[in-house]
């Protein structure tokens, strides 16, 4: 949830986000995705938000366990990959990737997990025009043996879950780009209502979250 300062306040009060790399966000109190929500969206301007210190973020390790990442986004363009939520410290062939949620350069939403062993990519490009909000959810479900991507409340693709045990020990959870060391794949647009759950949300709950946000458009 965005506040007036360059801080994103965690609804649990535990992991507030701090804007950690230039350029600064274009604005913090933008109109959000949910009707009459006093907390506003963040308009990223190519920087990165860090939500946990690298040495103290085991709460954000999925390691291939039951996991859900969700976000509302309003993106302006599709001229580069844009990663909204990431646990990724790869550089020069080193490091690891736990999970990434975002859109590729062709406008397809994507959820990647476990060192890219699982790439759930939407088969159809989304409408990305700087005006349209989308609700994007990635679900890692060991019990079902699959990794799934939901767009605007509906499951659009799933792949088999074959790899577990990969975590990122030396990088923070980030919003707005895949990591502090790869800002070039930044979000150009707004993010709102980002949430992470250590369970695999069922389809009916994901659909309920979508309707809760979409039936009453932002003011």
Image (spheres, grey):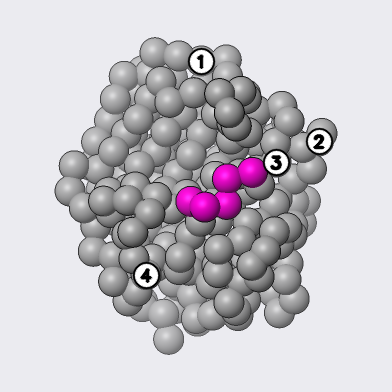
- The answer to whether residue 47 is seen in the rendering is yes
Disc with the residue nearer the chain's start (3 vs 4): 4
Seen in the image, is 101 located left or right of residue 25?
Answer: left
Circle 4: element type: loop
Decide whether the magenta segment is chiefly helix, strand or loop: helix
Query: Is the Cβ of the residue at disc 3 closer than 8 Å to that at disc 4?
Result: no
Disc with the residue nearer the chain's start (3 vs 1): 1
Q: Residues within 10 Å of mark 2 (few under 14, many from 20)?
A: few
Seen in the image, is 132 located left or right of residue 182?
Answer: left
Quarter placement of the C terminus: bottom left
Quarter placement of the N terminus: bottom right
| Spatial separation of the CA atoms under disc 3 and disc 1 | 20 Å
Q: Residue furthest front?
A: 92
- The answer to whether residue 215 is seen in the rendering is no
Q: Residue furthest left?
A: 124
Q: Residue furthest right?
A: 55
Tell me residue 14's x, y (percent): 77, 51
Given this view, does label 2 or label 4 mark the residue nearer the observer?
4
Given this view, does label 3 or label 2 mark the residue nearer the observer?
3
Q: Which numbered tag is attached to residue 56?
A: 2
Seen in the image, is 63 located left or right of residue 151?
Answer: right
Residue at 61%, 23% in the rendered image: 94
Query: Is the Cβ of the residue at disc 4 closer than 8 Å to that at disc 1?
Result: no
Tell me residue 166's x, y (percent): 58, 19
Residue at 69%, 74% in the rendered image: 3
| Spatial separation of the CA atoms under disc 2 and disc 4 | 33 Å
* Residue that label 1 marks: 164
* Residue that label 3 marks: 172
Disc with the residue nearer the chain's start (4 vs 1): 4
* Residue that label 4 marks: 76
Magenta highlight range: 181-185
Disc with the residue nearer the chain's start (3 vs 2): 2
């Amino acid at each position: 949830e965005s506040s007036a300062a360059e801080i994103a306040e965690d609804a649990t009060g535990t992991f507030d986000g701090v804007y950690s790399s230039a350029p600064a966000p274009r604005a913090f109190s933008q109109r959000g995705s949910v009707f009459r929500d006093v907390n506003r969206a963040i308009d990223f301007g190519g920087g990165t938000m860090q939500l946990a210190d690298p040495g103290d973020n085991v709460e954000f390790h999925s390691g291939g366990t039951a996991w859900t990442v969700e976000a509302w986004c309003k993106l302006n363009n599709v001229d580069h990959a844009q990663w909204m939520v990431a646990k990724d410290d790869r550089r020069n062939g080193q490091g690891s990737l736990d999970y990434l949620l975002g859109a590729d350069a062709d406008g397809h939403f994507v959820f990647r997990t476990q060192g890219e062993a699982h790439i759930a990519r939407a088969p159809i490009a989304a409408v990305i025009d700087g005006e349209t909000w989308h609700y994007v959810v990635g679900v890692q479900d060991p019990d079902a043996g699959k990794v799934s991507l939901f767009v605007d409340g509906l499951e659009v693709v799933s792949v088999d879950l074959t790899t577990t045990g990969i975590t990122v020990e030396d990088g923070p959870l980030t919003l707005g780009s895949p990591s502090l060391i790869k800002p070039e794949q930044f979000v150009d647009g707004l993010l709102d209502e980002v949430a992470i759950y250590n369970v695999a949300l069922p389809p009916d709950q994901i659909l309920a979250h979508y309707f809760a946000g979409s039936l009453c458009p932002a003011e």
